[in-house]
Structures are given as structure tokens and as C-alpha cells.
Image (cartoon, rainbow, N blue to C red):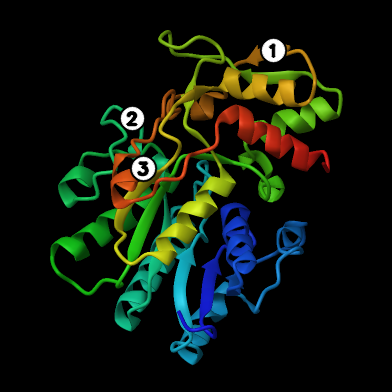
């Protein structure tokens, strides 16, 4: 891309978005963040990053019109990410409508487009975790919550556009993020990763807790997730933007499920403590929609040419704890 091109990162002050913005800026790109900061400390995610511009979401359509010849790519990470969000109209407005508007803008202006989907689209996992992006493959999935449904709706619409030969961006990718953890998530409240919550508890001298299993197939602490370090997610996005062959819907995990007990043990080890865990009942409000197992199938991403290794839970947690401890 010419040196004067702009990389637009929506949700760029958020968790994954700020890591992508930082990686792009470190590469020497001009980065434009689109987000809302509110009254908390979300702005601190952007403090180390040299930005070209900052745009509020409601101003983005006009900004894109004024800068349409300068945009190198749009990385759309902005969304309501809470799996417990109950306001369906908000989910449609923030997660569905904005995503499709940007998809159509990128198709019309021939601009590369990367957007965040989610492993929540897989629902209870009974249909597996195969990132089949065809309309038929997506039709088999049944998300368990409104957040997952909103992401799934966008995936299905894009799949239909591709299948029916409608205009699409020259390069595009939907990324089904699995359980992402790492720097930049402190503002997320109850949606913070278990790794961060445990670190905060142990650092304050508290007692570590995990959810008790309510499924006889899994022991307490044996619930399995594909935990992926956020730096790996940013690396995948930069790789997509560097090459010109990649288009499709792809899982973004490590390809290996690990237990919450594994994750907790890694936190204890990184903090130099002996693991002591108390198990508590899972809230009934989420018990019927809880995923006991997720594991990304990574074959399609690898076949597309991505060869870099993914960080193990032990190494990722160690790096994260060191960062949290200011080392």
C-alpha cells in the first residue's frame, strides 16, 4: 500500500482492537481508531500507540466518505461482546447493522475487510467446530445466546453474498475468535478472562474460585476451552492484511482445548504460588447455555498459508502475568 494509506480499526480502543492497532502502528502504518471511550480507563489501551486519528462510531460514515481514497483496509472489531446481553435491538444495531454496512462499503470501494466473528456461533458444539463458511455449513449451527446469533447472522449474510456472486471486498476474512486473553482487557468488567480475574484475586490475597461442573462428563475445573493469546490474534490479522490470497471465514484459536484448571494452574505458577482452588456453583442464568468444550479446527487457516506457531497456555499466561506485574 502507498505510505499515505490509512488502516481503520473499529473497536480500536477495546481488547483485541487495541492490540491490532498497536501492531499496525509498530509496523509503521497510519492507524485510525473508531470507538467510544466512556468515563473509565479504556483510553489507557491507546496511550502507548501513535495514532493518526480517532473517530466516534456515529461519525464514521461521513469520515469514510471524506477519506474514501485513503483507506487501505478496515479491521472491524467493534461490537457488543457480552454473551449475556439481553437487548436484541442493541445487538442488531451494533453487531449486525454496522458490520454489514462496513462490508458493503468495502465491497463498493474495493477495500480489504477483516471482521470479528466468534466461537459463540457454534452454540453447544454438538455440530463441531469446523469453520465451514458455506451457507450449508453455517445453517447447521445453533448459537445459544443473542451475541452468538448476531455474529452468526453476519456470517450467513456474507456467505450468501459470496455464493450468489454479489460484490465483495477484494480481500476479506471473518475470524471466529475463541477464548482470547491477554493485555488490554481490564476494562471489560465481568467479561474479563479467567486468567485476569484469577490474577486480580490472588494479587489481592483472595481465594481462587472456578465454576463447578454441572455436566457429569466433565470434572470440576475440567471444562475445556481453546485459550488463545491476544498477541497471536493480532499477528494473524496483520498476516491477512499483508497477503492478497486470503478470503473466507476462519477459526482463530490454537487448535488445542485446555481445561480451566490448566489455566488456573498456569496463573498460580506464574505468580509463584501453590494452586488452591474452591469450586462454586455456576449461576443458573447461564447454566443451560454453557459451552463445556471448544476447540478450534485450524486446518483452513494453515492451508491458507499461516505457519506461525500459537502460544501455549503456560507461555501466554507467564507473559501476561509478567506484564500485569510490570515486568
- Locate residue 165, reporting x and y percent: 14, 69
Mark 3 neighbour density, 10 Å: few (under 14) some (14–19) many (20 or more): many
- Locate residue 257, reporting x and y percent: 45, 26
> If you read the primary sequence from the N terminus, does the residue marked by circle 3 or circle 1 appear first?
3
**Residue placed under numbered mark 2 in the picture:** 125
Determine the secondary structure under disc 3.
Answer: helix
Q: Quadrant of residue 116?
A: bottom left
Residue 278: mark in rendering: 1
Q: Indicate left or right for 7 with 28 as reference.
A: left
Determine the secondary structure under disc 2.
Answer: loop
- Locate residue 56, reporting x and y percent: 61, 75
* Residue 12 visible here: no
Residue lying at 19% horizontally and 60% vertically, measured from the top left: 160
Determine the secondary structure under disc 1.
Answer: strand
Residue 121: mark in rendering: 3
Q: CA distance from mark 3 to mark 2?
A: 9 Å
Mark 1 neighbour density, 10 Å: few (under 14) some (14–19) many (20 or more): few
* Residue 129 visible here: yes
> If you read the primary sequence from the N terminus, does the residue marked by circle 2 or circle 1 appear first?
2
Residue lying at 78% horizontally and 28% vertically, measured from the top left: 201
Q: Is residue 259 above or below residue 28?
A: above
Q: CA distance from mark 2 to mark 1?
A: 27 Å
Q: Indicate left or right for 184 with 251 as reference.
A: right
Amino acid at each position: 500500500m502507498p505510505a499515505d494509506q490509512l488502516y481503520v480499526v473499529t473497536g480500536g480502543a477495546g481488547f483485541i482492537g487495541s492490540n491490532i492497532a498497536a501492531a499496525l502502528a509498530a509496523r509503521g502504518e497510519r492507524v485510525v481508531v473508531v470507538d467510544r471511550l466512556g468515563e473509565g480507563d479504556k483510553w489507557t489501551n491507546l496511550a502507548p500507540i501513535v495514532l493518526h486519528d480517532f473517530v466516534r462510531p456515529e461519525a464514521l460514515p461521513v469520515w469514510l466518505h471524506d477519506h474514501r481514497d485513503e483507506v487501505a483496509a478496515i479491521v472491524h472489531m467493534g461490537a457488543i461482546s457480552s454473551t449475556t446481553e439481553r437487548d436484541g435491538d442493541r445487538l442488531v444495531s451494533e453487531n449486525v447493522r454496522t458490520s454489514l454496512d462496513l462490508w458493503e462499503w468495502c465491497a463498493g470501494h474495493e477495500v480489504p475487510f477483516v471482521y470479528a466473528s466468534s466461537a459463540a456461533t457454534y452454540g453447544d458444539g454438538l455440530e463441531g467446530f469446523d469453520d465451514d463458511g458455506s451457507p450449508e455449513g453455517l445453517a447447521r449451527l445453533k448459537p445459544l445466546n443473542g451475541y452468538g446469533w448476531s455474529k452468526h447472522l453476519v456470517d450467513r449474510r456474507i456467505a450468501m453474498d459470496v455464493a450468489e456472486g454479489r460484490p465483495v471486498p477484494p480481500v476479506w476474512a471473518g475470524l471466529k475468535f475463541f477464548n482470547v486473553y491477554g493485555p488490554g482487557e481490564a476494562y471489560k468488567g465481568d467479561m474479563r478472562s479467567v486468567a485476569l480475574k484469577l490474577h486480580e484475586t490472588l494479587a489481592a490475597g483472595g481465594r481462587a474460585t472456578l465454576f463447578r461442573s454441572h455436566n457429569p462428563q466433565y470434572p470440576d475445573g475440567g471444562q475445556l476451552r481453546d485459550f488463545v493469546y491476544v498477541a497471536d490474534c493480532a499477528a494473524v490479522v496483520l498476516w491477512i492484511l499483508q497477503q492478497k490470497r486470503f478470503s473466507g471465514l476462519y477459526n482463530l484459536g490454537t487448535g488445542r482445548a485446555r481445561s480451566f484448571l490448566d489455566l488456573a494452574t498456569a496463573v498460580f505458577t506464574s505468580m509463584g504460588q501453590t494452586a488452591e482452588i474452591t469450586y462454586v456453583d455456576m449461576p443458573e442464568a447461564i447454566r443451560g447455555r454453557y459451552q463445556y468444550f471448544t476447540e478450534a479446527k485450524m486446518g483452513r487457516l494453515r492451508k491458507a498459508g499461516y505457519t506461525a506457531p500459537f502460544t501455549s497456555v503456560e507461555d501466554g499466561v507467564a507473559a501476561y502475568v509478567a506484564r500485569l506485574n510490570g515486568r
